[in-house]
Image (tube, rainbow, N blue to C red):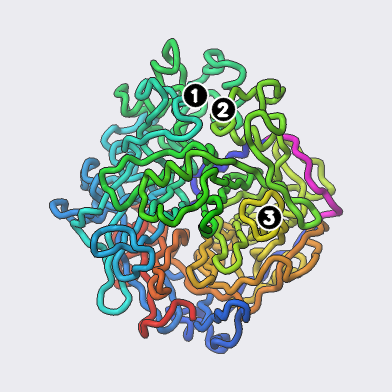
Amino acid sequence: MSHNIYDDNEIVNSSTNLHMDDLLAIRLSRRQTLKGGIGLTATALLGGLSLTACGGDSSSGLKLGFAAVAKNKLDVVTVPEGYQVSILHALGDPMMYGDESWKDNGSETAESYNRRIGDGHDGMYYFGMADAGTYQAERSDRGLLCVNHEYVVQPYGLHANGLTAGATRVAAEVDKEIYAHGVSVVEVKRNIGFDMSMVRGSKFNRRITSATEMAFTGPAKGSAQLKTKFSTDGTKTRGTNNNCANGYTPWGTYLTCEENWLNVVSRAAADNANRTAKEVVALNRYGLPENRKSPYLWDTAGADDLYSRWSSTATGANATEDYRNTANTFGWVVEIDPFNATSIPAKRTALARINHEGAWPAPAVVGQPIVIYQGDDARNEYIYKFVSKALWDAKDVAGGMAAGAKYLDEGTMYVAKFNADGTGQWIELAYGKNSLDSKNATYAFEDQADVLINIRLAGDIVGATKMDRPEWGAVNPLNGEAYMTLTNNSNRVSVAATPTGSQLKPDAANPRYYEDTYTNSDGSTKVNKGNPFGHIIRWKEDAANQAAVKFSWDIYLFGAEATDKPDVNLSGLTAVNDFASPDGLYFDPRGMLWIQTDDSAYTDVTNCMMLAAVPGKVGDGGTATAAGGTSTLKGANATPETVRRFLVGPKDCEITGIAVTPDGKTMFFNVQHPGENGSLAKPTSAWPETQTSASSIKRPRSATVVVSRKDGDNLGA
């Protein structure tokens, strides 16, 4: 998830859940700046730090065999020696024939974005495809790639002269932005070697946008809280928005997740007077108080229903005469069948409504339920788990949306509580259990639909652990252990301080508090407080049962600079693997872990990056005391043999989204918002053109990148 004015970083969890507070906070000295030259390959970048394939995790047989790429601020994707990079597609590229190629002037019509690649590339997944056009999981040379388009990167890209300023939006610009959100599905095939290209004109190529009709399924289907002027029975809606991370299913469908949907939803002043007390509680908890204007202001583009639907203001006699419930129609996991271009996407309400960063399945086991982990990406929010009622039957492979209805429309939601001793519980979030009923004083739930639509309130009530921005998750295919990035949290205070508002003291699962001061490129000073570099937590389910209600946990890695003090650099990071703000996370089929960053705390030294890791297992470290004095449980220290920097992205970007073909030889990843700190008048990046032409002055664009080894061997090995 990117860090700009279009992010929903408001803290709306002011519940009084108890946490594990400890000792005194300490302050850190001004951090050291890495010295040394930079270049395009690892050999030039690191010289004597070049590494050989000499180590790894003996339990998996994996070894890291590339020379670590050094931190740099170049306007290219920098990869290890022996690797190659190509651009699969970028914002505005046509998916079909008949539309003009990208012109670099914003002249493309809004309507054409129903057939063009969208903006803000983010989560994605590769699905192998058989010659017959059906799902074939093991196929690596031909497949369908589903890519999320999280948001519109302003002021670059879409519009001829950037965003037209003013309190009301230009309708033609809004139309283009609506169509540039959502998901792209494209066919891809291997070229000579292990590079990939998009198959332009494929019958499978498809856009799903913020205007695409979708169905509600599961327990909340037909709920009064989902009724709108468009769907008076609450069974359908239009559009998926701010699609960040993702998931997939063992039957071969794509899960796209709606995260910062508040970007597009406004609410007028004095609207509380037209709402029930319960509605006001729910709206506030989800970050939508009255008189709240969305950053996009889509609702100001005109009186037409296409624009008015982005306002959640109560204007009619009831919910079927306006869009007061429009906020409730976003924040869901949306299932898409990439192999059926005429299928209707489904918002699977059994997986609840949050700022969905993603939905990550545990490996499917015949005779056991489908398990999906989820993160709510905002400071102080929670980690969740869904367990299906139906048990997995391998006959449902390639079952499409019918299989989705079987496994995703009925099941149990849980929320995580992390204890200070390294144990944890999954607390059931079901109507009639754990005080989630009509008698609850905080929020009187009516039924299970109400619990799922307002599951943040349910998490508050049962005492879930507030986390430092849960983002991407991943499950180790070798041992079933789950990992989740906790990107950062500037809202924490020291154990000696008195919290105010939504501030939190450290606890064992979120243990660090310190201050990090540095000088920006313009000479200004910035102070990051709390947990500015983030960490990665992991857990092991009890008795190796993914559906268990108990687990054990530790913190796999702490983001830090190599020069930080030991109680900040708790994982012992060095120049070959130090990082900040972990975000994207992915296990490839071999069990190698890939870690991506979306950083605003270390950008005085380096652009965002991706690291490769050979992970250990929960409990392979020990106890530690973090900066600020809080005790925690940490994994084994990182070494150059277990964690290395694999690539660095271009200027001002986020590295996000990743997929690896089943044979481990081709990687896809996304570069989002290169040059976001510049403007059309003063650009700071011209990527992806600079990847092949250093003197380019074209507009920067989000894009999907393909990485492979020149010798055709496995990635990272």
Q: Amino acid at mark 1?
A: Gln
Quarter of the image holding residue 501? Answer: top right
Estimate the spatial distance between the alpha carbons at disc 1 and disc 2, rounded to whole Å.
8 Å
Q: Amino acid at mark 3?
A: Asn
Q: Which residue is mark 2?
A: 450
Q: Which residue is mark 3?
A: 531
Quarter of the image holding residue 699? Answer: bottom left
Residue at the (42%, 45%) spot, across then down: 404
User: Magenta stretch?
Assistant: 14-25
In front: 585, or 527?
585
Mark number displayed over residue 225: 1
| Residue contact at pointers 1 and 3, CB within 8 angstroms | no
Residue at the (26%, 63%) spot, across then down: 198
Left or right: 339 as drawn, with respect to 377: left
Residue at the (43%, 49%) spot, across then down: 255
- 260 w.r.t. 322: above or below: below
In the rendered image, is residue 288 in sight? yes
Q: Tell which tag, 1 or 3, sits nearer the viewer.
A: 1
Q: Secondary structure at mark 2?
A: helix
Q: Secondary structure at mark 3?
A: loop
- 329 w.r.t. 158: above or below: above
- Point out residue 588 in the picture as x, y percentages from the top left corner: 48, 68
Label count reads 3
